[in-house]
Image (cartoon, rainbow, N blue to C red):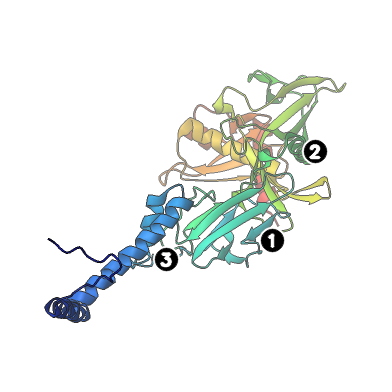
Amino acid sequence: MMQQDDPGAPELEVTSLDSGMARHKRLKSAGRWLRSRPGRLTLSALTLLTVVAALAGMFARASSDPISEARTVLGMFTPTPTPVIPPGGDVFGLINAVPWGDLQIDDHAPTLTTIEPIGQGFTLPRGVHHVVYRARYFPTLHCVVSVPQAPDDTCPLSNLTVTEGLAFQRIIDLGAFPNRMAPTHYNQLTSAVNTALGGYSASATIEPGERYLNQLGKVEIAQTAMAFTMGLEQAEEPKDPNCPFLCPMDGNASVISSEWDLTARVEPTWTIKDATGRTFSSLITSAPATTYGALGPDTVTFAVVLDGTDWKVSSQDQGALDGIVQLAALEAVKAQYGPILNGTTSGRNPANGAIVTVQRDTSMPQAVLLWRFGLLYAANTDTKRQFPALPLANQQEQALAQAMAAEMSGP
């Protein structure tokens, strides 16, 4: 009969001494391996993977793009070279600003210095910088630039060519073109400029028997004395979206200037009236025959100041009308006969005309031409031989040309 175990007796576990000694030897051996170089490297790798896995889990819960975040984390452990700032890469020029504008870089006004040839500019340290430009009547500019330049920079840059050797590489375009203002303010500005253009006026008398160009571009002979008045009017250029009429002068930054220098595109006009004051004819630049010296558009410079809400416009080019008449005479010769070796013009009263002295090449003597009442003449017989298509000035016109030449060469 088999004896049953006593259910109340304690259970005993018997362990072999040999198996305990074996475990101790294994642990001792593992400890030695962990202290060895391969063991230390393996332990370090396992620890790093554990940390990365934990961080990746955190970013996976907090980020919509855990893969990019994980790459960022891994990048912390991969040294990357510091980008090199090229010469001039930390220097910025400015263009198209107004005197009353406020420029802020990282919430501070930059220290401006003169940077040739663009004008005012500043230097920035390495990093990302926030630019804000505010000017009344213009949209506020918010943008970012980096040093060195980064693909995601947003500040508009001028397309002016920056050649090698200059002190800067980037020119920030602040965008203060006149036609970017609200229509009401732009119209007020153009009205003030047109009022200033009214100050350009010159008058002369067409004597009976003198020739002039009528409104159809045809030559006529005056039967009675008539008043000939010249002036300047606004000329539009629809092909230029930034400044069809008014442009910042040479992109002048005007950051620290008190005046806003603008160039106005203009064209000369003339009006002829008889003795009773009745307008006889009026011609605006469109004479069809370039032989007769039709005038074309040009520019006049104005200094503009914003005084409260009023525009103060003053001329920076008092001789503009005279210069345009002289240029028209010279350009008329070029249009008919091609390049001119050299040419000079003179004439104190643009309505009275201008004389043009030109030389076509070194083998020819100087030629003298007269522009008067819309017509271009050979002022003497020698000039007529060089320019056979031009009408020869009569004795009265030749005497006038000689007097004008003497007047301009005198003290």
| Nearer to us in this view, 308 or 131 | 131
- The three-letter amino acid code for the residue at tag 3 is Ile
Q: 357 above or below 2?
A: above
Q: Position of residue 374 (x, y in %)?
A: 65, 29
Disc 2 designates what residue?
195
Q: In this view, does 289 lie to the left or right of 29?
A: right
Foreground mark, 1 or 2? 1
What's the residue at 34%, 67% (across, down)? Answer: 77
Mark-to-mark CA distance, 3 and 2: 50 Å
Disc 3 or disc 2, which is closer to the eye?
A: 3
**Quarter-of-image position of residue 237:** top right
State the image quarter where residue 287 is shown.
top right
Q: What element carries label 2?
A: helix
What mark, if any, has residue 124 been given in the picture? none
Would residue 145 appear left or right of 4 to someone viewing this image? right
Q: Which amino acid does label 2 sit on?
A: Thr
Residue in the image at 65% along x and 53% along y: 133
Q: Is mark 3 on a helix, strand or loop?
A: loop
Q: Vertically, is 52 above or below 18?
A: above
Earlier residue among tags 3 and 1: 3
Residue nearest the viewer, comparing 188 with 86: 86
Rendering coords of residue 80 (x, y %): 34, 66
* Disc 3 from disc 1: Cα separation: 28 Å
The residue that disc 3 covers is 85
The residue lying at 23 percent from left, 76 percent from top is 40
Mark 1 and mark 2: Cα distance apart in space: 27 Å
Q: Which amino acid does label 1 sit on?
A: Ile
Mark 1 or mark 2, earlier in chain? 2
Residue receiving disc 1: 256
Q: How many labels does the image show?
A: 3
